[in-house]
Image: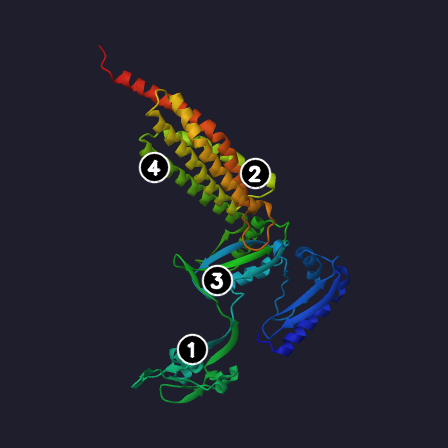
Amino acid sequence: PHFTLRDADEAMEKIRLACLPVHDVLKVEDVAAFFDSDDGALMFFMEPSGATTRSSFMEVLRPHLPELPGVEIRVGSDDEEEKKKTWVRARGREPLVLESLLARTAVELRKEPGVLDVLTSNETSTDEVRVDVQPERAQRFGVAPSSVASLVAWALRGAPLSDFHEESGELPFWIQYEGSDMESLGELYRVPVYSEFGQPTALANLATFGVDKGVPSIKRRRGRVEGQLEIVLANDASPDRLAIRAQQIFQSLEVPEGYELILEGGERGMEEAQRDLAQATLFGGLLILLIMGVLFESFVLPLCVLGSIPFLVVGSYWGMLFFGEAMGEVAYIGFVILLGIVVNNAIVLVDTINRFRERHPTRAAAILEAGAARVRPILMTACTTVVGLAPLVLLPNPGEGIDYRPLAVIVMGGLTASTLFTLLVVPLLYTLLDDARDHVAGVVRRWSQPRA
């Protein structure tokens, strides 16, 4: 429904008066109201000892909120650190039908314990005038519905005329009503519509009018329209449980064929991101082995490079545990970066051993000299990286934007542990794999020799 400023003022006053009994319980210090004809906000300023969490505030306030026709009441907070969210997506054929299903799901989902708010993709839409042509009326007056649609578009937006040509160029011309002629919906009621016989009749005689929320944007994926619900949760609420509950509510509605609700976001989104990063890491590792096999002309020796990977995993884990950080998407990105650094150190060490074997009579001498030659560059790489990332870990987080502390902790912990063990484990694995390769080659040669 369309509200005037007086209607909005009365609604805000009713809400304010309904909340008066809980002011002492919540220790409300002051209340301020801001509103226009479309929406508004009632801001509660709390005493320092008052309720500080949105969930506790909601539990006390919700039973006292009045139910007003055409008014949707939600409770929010400026404390972004409290917000815990999950998302569900829905797909279908028609945007308006999909938005209607999501809106009905949101209404029921807001009643669930642990749900602070539910936002639909329609929240940012603006009011639109809906004109529904009644077929029987149009037929009685001899008017085609398509001509009514063209007339309404012309009345609201105008229509282009032929360009005016002059020496300096072309000037576009439009024909449209003056602004004062279309200031209200009542003016649209009186727009004349002409029948095929030239008889005029008012648009109000052919159609019904309404004001609805329009679709702010239409997203399509694989040929189907897509919408979204954003569920804001209390800290102790389970994102998975409420996402599944949203799916149950959606399915309990009269859902036409071709419409479905898909779970995503929250913990499920994190699991999907982790799977994607794990696949990317595995694919990158296979490419590294393939390239090393081509460059080393062997697919056995590159395997010793993998000996440094377990130590970077252990170092990363203990680093996260020591600094109290949690795994997340940023941390997994740091793990991929760390994998590249550590593997690079191991590759350079193996390549140095291979080059030194050409000028040393024994393998042991080549390994010792290669280790002595590479220990300084490897330690310098590790130290400069750790020192460069230290400010991200030691300085306080400003609280805005992306927190890169998990990335820095992953790289610092994993690089420190792998550097200490790479110089020991990689040469050891090199020796074992080289012996195994020589042994297998000897067995193959003996079996391939012709027997007497």
| Element on which disc 2 rests | helix
The amino acid type, in three-letter code, at marker 4 is Ile
Q: Position of residue 72 (x, y in %)?
A: 61, 67
Disc marking residue 285: none
Which residue position is annotated with label 2? 319
Label whose residue precedes the other's in the sequence (4 or 1): 1
Q: Vertically, is 319 above or below 99?
A: above
Q: Nearer the viewer, residue 348 or 239?
A: 348
User: Is residue 359 toward the left or the right of residue 157 in the image?
Assistant: left
Judge whether 289 appears above or below 91 on screen.
above
Q: Mark 4 packing: few (<14 Cα in 10 Å), some, or many (20+)?
A: some
Q: Which residue is mark 3?
A: 98
Residue pictured at 54% horizontal, 38% vertical:
413
Residue placed most toward the observer, 356 or 143: 356
State whether residue 89 appears in this view: yes
At horizontal 69% and vertical 64% (from top left) the residue drawn is 44
Above or below, 436 relative to 41? above
Q: At which x and y percent is residue 138?
A: 42, 81
- Of the image marks 1 and 3, the number of the one nearer the N terminus: 3
Q: What's the residue type where badge 2 is placed?
A: Gly
Foreground label between 4 and 3: 4
> Disc 1 marks which residue?
135
Q: Label 3 near label 1: C-beta < 8 Å?
A: no
Name the front one of labels 1 and 3: 3
The Cα–Cα distance between marks 3 and 2, rounded to whole angstroms, is 47 Å
Quadrant location of residue 231? Answer: bottom right
Q: CA distance from mark 4 to mark 1?
A: 70 Å
The label number, if any, that marks residue 291 in the structure image:
4
Q: Position of residue 96 (x, y in %)?
A: 47, 66
User: Which amino acid lies under the numbered mark 1 shown in the image of this protein?
Assistant: Pro
Residue at mark 4 to residue at mark 3: CA–CA distance: 50 Å
Q: Whole-Å distance between the Cαs marked 2 and 1?
A: 71 Å
